[in-house]
Amino acid sequence: MSIYLDHNATSPLDARALEAMHPWLTGVHGNPASVHRYGRAAHAALEVARAQVAALVNAQPAQVVFTGGGTEADNLALKGVCSGAPSGRLLVGSLEHSAVLGPAEALAKQGWKLEYIPADGEGRYDAEAYGRMLQQGGVKLVSAMLANNETGAIQDVKHMAASAHAAGALLHCDAVQAAGKLPLDFTDLGADLMTLSAHKLNGPRGVGALIMNRRVMLTPLVDGGGQERGLRGGTENLAGIVGFGRAAELAKSESNDRMAHARALRDRAEAGIAGLPGLRIFAAGAERLANTLQFGIAGLDGEWLVMELDKRGIAVSSGSACHSGSGEPSHVLTAMGFDAATAKGALRVSFGAGNTGQDADAVCAALKEIVGSLGKRVAAVGW
């Protein structure tokens, strides 16, 4: 048995995206910056992909800057805004991915006053606390994710953006986990900057994008030949970008069916584990991504459970793939108010289009078997 239930870490490359990439990997060699026919063909393919990615989030193609992944796009957003401005206050959500926390902490070392937006026990940012933080003045940039990669909890970014603008600040939204799982409208959301990543929506790894309001001024991270309107130097990864574009096109056209399928599997799994002793489902009271289920079983270590399930051919995660194996409790759960032991016990199951009801049943059966095998031990320690 081999079952993959870790789609929030990375998703399988869609065969249709690979098919779109194939000519640019094997047969066509033009550089998009070249003016001969090969270069013109490459440039045309680049711009088709740019339009496809823009359409996924209801943006204009000129607002899309391709990068080497979501992490680079997050860095370009935060450092690109802050490097070109005098230091001030930078508000970052306490639940953000390390791709945002890392550059924010780097900026703090350069003189920016970094402050974290608190969250409640369901994984939602505290709107009242956020409002008070803005009222203190001097905020230049806010960064808040649309959907959490661990709990799946969805944030009210539209309200956060409006509040930021009223306070004279810009807002960056990390939508890496939300893209392909939620309808996205960059214009309606009101964000000034939005991060996407191809491999989270069945595209290739190593390709991302920053969607930006064209009024925002950014300092590039990578200087070079002027590619991507001077915001990301270096010859574009054309095959990867073409795959990203096709994956974005498919995600947009199939989103309703994908979400309904994922929600059915998530709910089936949630019902299937409901009787486990000491079960806690995280962010159960919040609006969540349809495919995401994070939970803990009292007294059991999350990474140990990951390995036990792996022995049975089932791949899940104990939280963010970037911190897997670190031994540290989830910063997301600790920011939600859980103690370290509870946070270290978290297990995340994330479904994708290729999963079936049998997959959901299999992970539930495996968990029941694992917990059942510990019966006497569990009773002895009062788990």
Image: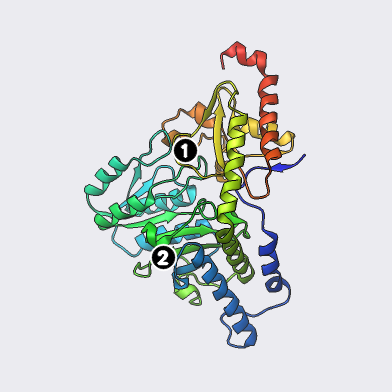
Residue type beneath disc 1: His
Residues packed near mark 1 inside 10 Å, few (<14), some (14 to 19) or many (20 plus): many
Q: Is residue 349 visible?
A: no
Q: CA distance from mark 2 to mark 1?
A: 28 Å
Which residue is identified by label 2? 212
Residue 147 as seen in the image, left or right of residue 316: left
Q: Which residue lies at the image location 42% right of the left edge and 55% below the top edge?
A: 173
Label placed on residue 110: none
Q: Position of residue 323 (x, y in %)?
A: 55, 42
Residue beneath the point at 71% across and 42% down: 3
Other-residue count near label 2 (Cα within 10 Å), few / some / many at <14 / 14–19 / ≥20: many
Looking at marks 2 and 1 on the same chain, the residue that comes earlier in the sequence is marked by: 2
Q: Give the residue furthest to the top.
A: 380
The quadrant in which residue 319 appears is top right
**Which x, y percent locates residue 362?**
70, 34
* Residue of label 1: 331
**Would residue 218 be found to the left or right of residue 362 on screen?**
left
